[in-house]
Image (cartoon, rainbow, N blue to C red):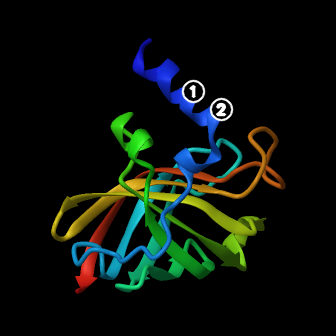
Amino acid sequence: MNLVKLAMVLWMSTGTVFSALPGFTAPPELTGKWAGKGTVIVSWCEKVSLDFSISISSDGKVVGMIGDAVLENGTIRRNNWLLRLLNNPEFIVEGDLSGPLVTEEGIVRNSAKYLMLDIESPNQLSGGFHSSGKHVGGKDSMMFTVFGINLERLVR
């Protein structure tokens, strides 16, 4: 059985394979203030890049801005071991969004479904972003997706 089939069998057999472990403490390499941008890859948005500014505390809480929206009730967790084994990012940030992601285009989403991050160096994170929304649709309902996010550490 190849690795992808094994992953599917595990995923279908138990919901705990993909759940986060309670009591996550963010490693020192992640804590601090980070800022940068990524490339918007949805065709219905005129803006070509989106700004990110986040603060990660040692207790795993995350606050900041994603585009023009405020990230609230954010948490960071280590991605599932199996997903990491399949080359997915090491860390996942999830949280609520308040306000529009892109004010001038009226693009609003309720939550940051996934802000996926990898540690590239002590002062750089990379990743991607998916908001809440549908997999198909347009500006009013589809997931807002950003690729090639590069964040630089501002403060430890």
The furthest residue to the top: 1
Instruction: State yes or no: discs 1 and 2 in contact (Cβ < 8 Å).
Output: yes
Tell me the SS state at disc 1: helix
Residue matched to label 1: 8
Instruction: Indicate which disc residue 83 carries.
Output: none
Tell me if mark 1 has few (under 14), some (14-19) or many (20+) residues whose alpha carbon lies within 10 angstroms of its own: few
Q: Find residue 24 and report its horizontal and vertical position in percent.
A: 42, 73
Q: Find residue 150 and report its horizontal and vertical position in percent.
A: 33, 60
Which amino acid type corresponds to the residue marked 1 in the rendered image? Met
Q: Which is more toward the observer, 149 or 134?
A: 134
Question: What is the quadrant of the N terminus in the image?
Answer: top left
Q: Is residue 44 visible?
A: yes
Residue matched to label 2: 12
Tell me the SS state at disc 2: helix
On screen, 116 above or below 33?
above
Q: Find residue 105 and report its horizontal and vertical position in percent.
A: 73, 64
Specify the quadrant of the image occupied by residue 101: bottom right
On screen, 124 above or below 60?
above
Q: Which is more toward the observer, 68 or 90?
A: 90
* Mark 1–mark 2 distance (CA, rounded to whole Å): 6 Å
Residue pictured at 34% horizontal, 37% vertical: 85
Residue pictured at 67% horizontal, 52% vertical: 45
